[in-house]
Amino acid sequence: MASDAERGGAGAGRTVAVLGGGKIGEALLGGLVAAGREPARLLVVEPVATRARELTSRLGVRAVDAAGAAREADVLVIAVKPADVPGALDAVHDVLAGRAPGEDRPTVVSLAAGIPTTALETRLPVDTAVVRVMPNTPMLVGRAMCVLSAGAAAGEPELAAAEELLAAVGRTVRVPEAQQDLATALSGSGPAYVFLLAEAMVDAGVALGLPRPVATELVSATVDGAGGLLTTPGSDGRGDSDGGAPHPGLLREAVTSPGGTTAAALSALEADGLRAALARAVGAARDRSAALGRQYG
């Protein structure tokens, strides 16, 4: 008998169709193939024929049209640009309407930034289960942070299905949809904050005399290593019995000797208002995400 998650479309024997063969769509399909999913059960809808052939050749997935994806899919992933979402949903609507709600109709997982579940649901047959996801660009290297919110007809089986699907490309967390704009500001936009910090560190090293390739290697390896500490339970010295994420403040303190070089650097950053600047940046990103979402209702 199928489990709840399998009925929601997450089982390894289920068919996943991705509408959109761009970088995010390719990253998801590639992650699923690497995780052992049968390529014949993975479909891609990509209108550019050369790109569709490229994905088929590289990953072994099947290229189909939108109607074919809607007929076969147990999970239908929307991985097109936000402006292209209405057209993508219209292309599958009639076929989905011919499939019964619940076990027969696929769960729709949207990776389109900023579009609320209500806007998606209005272009889909009534009672279609929708899960809204905000991924971020580390999905391209299998280290995504994906934030999930359930639509009106999506319950635990559908959320579990989406989580199992996205586990192939990184980590997931559930939030109420009202918190999606803030999650977007922290996670969706967050890699850009880290890249800007890394860029500034490299420029500072070059200005003080290091060759740019050396400065770039030093900073890139440092950011990667620091990220590893942030995601390794127990690295902050508290132990990992609760499985929780390490506390950044404790990790920072472990690097900071009294009167040392790190203390001097952090004092300068605090004096220049780094925390306040980041707080304003996150607030601005949240507000912009909310404004973009209102365009879609």
Image (tube, rainbow, N blue to C red):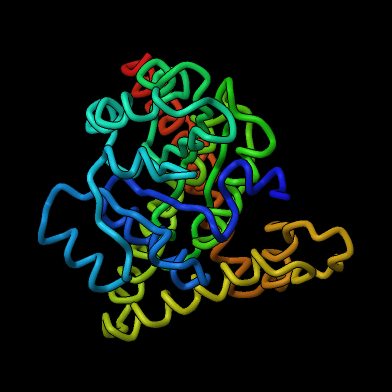
Q: Residue at x 26, y 25 (%)?
A: 90
| Residue at the spot 38% in from the left edge and 64% down from the top edge | 40
How far from the left and from the top, in percent, is residue 165?
A: 54, 53
Up the image or down, 225 lies above or below 275; here it is: below
User: On screen, 273 above or below 13?
Assistant: above
Q: Quadrant of residue 253?
A: bottom right
The reply, left or right, for residue 291 in relation to residue 212 is right
Image location (x, y in percent) of residue 217: 37, 82
Pick the residue in front: 21 or 185. Answer: 21
Along the viewing direction, whichever of 176 and 122 lies nearer the viewer? 122
Residue 289 screen position, x and y as percent: 40, 28
Q: Using residue 216 as the reference point, say whether residue 107 is left or right of it.
A: right
Quarter of the C terminus within the rendering: top left
At horizontal 19% and vertical 67% (from top left) the residue drawn is 54
- Position above or below: 24 against 162: below
Q: Give the vertical position of 281 relative to 239 (above or below).
A: above
Q: Which quarter of the figure has residue 275?
A: top right
- Which percent across, then down, holds residue 246? 73, 61
Toward the right, the furthest residue is 241
